[in-house]
Image: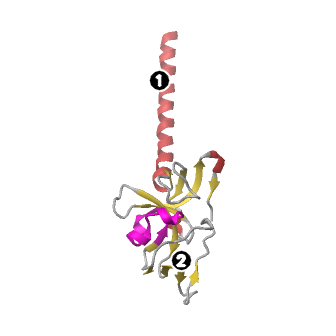
Amino acid sequence: MILFMSFKKIKVFLIELLESAVLSLIIILPIRFFIIQPFFVKGQSMEPNFHENDYLIIDELSYRLREPQRGEVVVLRSPFEKDYYFIKRIVGLPGETVSVKNGLVKIFNQANPEGIVLDEVYLETDEVTDGDLEVKISQGEYFVMGDNRRYSYDSRRWGLLKESDLIGRVWLRLWPVNVVKVYAR
């Protein structure tokens, strides 16, 4: 009789464990695949603000509720290899013209038809934006650049980012622990 009770208890325990696991998956998987996603930074294109192996949580939900904003750091699919991802900063928005000339980035839009030099407080003081181009941004496109302008492979070289290649914005840096930060707007 005692042996029978032990098997019954074990059976109840295993059923409860299975129910908990299934319930956890039902809750966690949609969050992981539709709301937030973890990423590791690879490369130096966003230095000094993000470094190799920084562990980031990407918010995939915000851009379903609102438009991306200038200055936000985003993760995107490579325009050439869809299984490869970049981290960049949004510089130009749909309907604007971005000019890169003489080391400066200038934005032309309805509010600034004569153009305004972009105030990029997130760049190192000696950082210069290389290039000589002017790009008109259509609806559903963005102009993105890395913060480490000398070593960033970005819209200056491969063109505009299609909105469909935008994964989400950086929401949280969890690693290294001495630089944990929430990037909320």
Label 1 CA crowd tier, 10 Å (few <14, some 14–19, many 20+): few
Residue 108 locus on image (x, y percent): 52, 84
* Residue 161 visible in this rendered orientation of the protein: no
Q: Dot 2: what SS? A: strand
Q: Which mark is residue 171?
A: none
Check the image and report above or below for 114 versus 52: below
Check the image and report above or below for 104 versus 185: below
Residue beneath disc 2: 105
Residue 149 locus on image (x, y percent): 51, 66
* Residue 47 visible in this rendered orientation of the protein: yes
Give the alpha-carbon distance from disc 2 to disc 1, as whole Å: 67 Å
Residue 106 locus on image (x, y percent): 54, 80
Check the image and report above or below for 8 versus 128: above
Q: Residue at x 46, y 47 (%)?
A: 29
Query: Residue farthest to the bottom?
Result: 114
Amino acid type assigned to the residue bearing label 2 in the image: Val
Amino acid type assigned to the residue bearing label 1 in the image: Lys
Residue beneath disc 1: 11
22 left or right, relative to 71: left
Give the magenta part as a residue range.
Answer: 143-167
